[in-house]
Image (tube, rainbow, N blue to C red):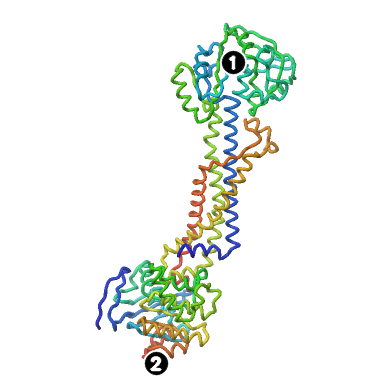
Amino acid sequence: MEKRAKQSDTGIEKLNSKDATVIDAHNISKTYNPGGIPIRAIKNIHLHLSKGEFVALVGPSGSGKTTLLNMIGGLDQPDSGSILINNTDITRLSQAKLVKFRLHHIGFVFQSYNLIPVLTAQENAEFIMLLQKIKKFKRNERIDMLFQAVGLSDKKNVRPSQLSGGQQQRVAVLRALASKPQFVLADEPTANLDSEAAFNLLDIMLKLNKEEGMTYIFSTHDQRVIDRVKRVIKLVDGEVVSDKITDIL
Amino acid sequence: MTIKIAWRNIWRNKIRSLIIIVSVSSGLLAGMAVISLYEGMMRSRVRTVIETETGHIQIHQKNFLNDRMTEYYIPNPQLISDHLKNDMSVRAFSERTISEGMLSTASGVSGVSIIGILPQNEIIVSGLDQKIKEGFLIPREDINGILIGKKLSQKLKIHLGQKIILTVTDSAGNLTSSAFRLRGIYQSDNALIDEVNVYVSQQSIQAMLTLKNQIHEISVLLKSDEQMDECLRRYKIKFPDLAIDSWKSLSPETNLLVTTVDYYSFIILVILFIAISFGIMNTMMMSVLERRYETGMMMALGMGKYKIMYMIILETIFLSIISIPVIIPMALMTIQYYGEKGIDLSGMGKDMMYSFGFETTIYPVFPIEKLPSLIILLFITAIISSILPTWKSVQNSPIQALRN
């Protein structure tokens, strides 16, 4: 495996290798104790993801998809095991470094859009780029391109409350993609969308996956998503029960 | 961007924000009103002291103020008089011959301070003619006329034209009495003065005391208050053997009031702002708790805790100071209006204010130099009010907030 890493200002090493393993989750476990009853959400999972993968984590509700996604995104910590991202164990990072890590490397798409209601669609999409202090002309260039790609150019100055569910989710996806993160972690991104909107959204993500080489990980049980990903990892009761490369492309 | 989000966040619940803005505005108005009333009262009291009681500066023989003995008169008063006449800072001055004595009428007796005056000078220096409520100011040649205060006239039940006997100890130590006719009754803003001070012509009291053109006191009224310290310094150098005092040492109780009024207004402001801060804090707490999911999501996206805290602090500051550009000019205009028209408080306690030496009509004045400190105090209130909501906003980790 050819790997060349460079220390970034966030303390996270950036990946330069084309085929390197960018995410290496090793023997991770997580147990929750709601009401004092321990529930093992994740059981000794090993997971390796390479750059540019388009992966779906599938499984029934409660199988641990979201928990795994959150741990990869540095939102949640495993009880044991390690998660190496670009050779840095993110389970050992401080909260402040995790925030920077998320800011510079991960784009999140949440199930319920989670746009900031007081910002316009464009401001929402720019949110992460603004936190990254990207210059205005670069932001505008990127935002114009993305809004055009998703057909929302005329909705840039509209607040989320004036957008439909599908439009809001598209803006949420734009927010995740705008800063060109290494990884896009999407939790049930199509759960609240009709088929047309869902396909539209997946087309955009596939297009950017091809063009920009971002790694996508979806947590989903939506067959429309599963049919379009390149790799499907199935979880049941917190364990990986299958990991298949699809022949979609 | 944080500023933009914070600004827009305060308008998410307009009614709630407006209620808190109105309460902050009311507090600010009340604070400015308190400061203005206090300032107005104090300035009025100082003017009363200077223009009707002591003048800016008084000159005495060194022992006179401690022991008002007849023999403690000012030596060479003409020298001082000439100096004052040539001093461009002096508006007017009045020479007085003073003696402690006994006032007797058919209905009673009272200890009094008898002040021998030159009426034409007193008109300028102490505005005595303006205080006459009944009768008239004694003319210079009226050697049998006497003026007494309203309070004393009520105490002894004396009426105009009645005969009054004054008894004093003359310069030889002999008791001597003279009869006077009550020509006028005056009323100042100070009940204590009205009960004690009686005025006769300088000629009469000098005759009673067997003093020849001797005086005990020179009261100096300057052209402006700002010249007082400089004149005081000069006179002390020029007349080192005399006691030269400003109104501040002659009326220490007034000086104490003036110097402590800032503390009183500050304490009242702090109490007001503490009450306001609870309102702001409550509003911000509601706002923060309603947005826990949203702040969790922002943290998940990469917005650091400090940025979230900064946003909440900004929201609190905006809520607190948003009304300043409107309320302060409004308050200043209102104060200006009442500063000219005056607020008549006679219905609230005329006698009480009179007994403390205050005028019953207050002309509020807002000292503009206190405006920055008032705004800073409000700013500090906002910061203090934001501590709990800010702390609460970053209590949950992103995952806890998103799960909730």
Identify which residue, B307 or B156, lies in the foreground. B307
On the image, the x and y values in percent for residue B30 come to 60, 47
In the image, residue A197 above or below residue B256: below
Q: Is residue B63 visible?
A: no
Give the quarter of the image for residue A202: bottom left
In the image, residue A159 above or below residue B351: below
Amino acid of disc 2? Ile
* Residue at image mark 2: A248
Q: Residue B290 carries which label?
A: none
In the image, residue B243 above or below residue B12: above
Q: In this view, does B76 lie to the left or right of A54?
A: right
* Residue at image mark 1: B98
What SS does tag 2 mark?
Answer: loop
Circle 2/circle 1 CB separation < 8 Å: no
Q: Can residue B284 be seen in this view?
A: yes
Q: How crowded is mark 2: few (under 14 residues within 10 Å), some or many (20 or more)?
A: few
Give the quarter of the image for residue B399: bottom left
Disc 2 to disc 1, C-alpha distance: 116 Å
The chain containing the residue under callout 1 comes to: B
Q: Do marks 2 and 1 share a subunit?
A: no
Q: How many marks?
A: 2
On the image, the x and y values in percent for residue A62 come to 46, 82
Residue drawn 45% across the image and 73% down it: A125
Image quadrant where one finds the N terminus of chain B? bottom left
Q: How crowded is mark 1: few (under 14 residues within 10 Å), some or many (20 or more)?
A: many
The chain containing the residue under callout 2 comes to: A
On the image, the x and y values in percent for residue B172 come to 57, 6
Give the quarter of the image for residue A143: bottom left
Q: Is residue B140 left or right of residue A160?
A: right
On the image, the x and y values in percent for residue B386 come to 49, 57
Amino acid of disc 1? Ile
Residue drawn 48% across the image and 57% down it: B387
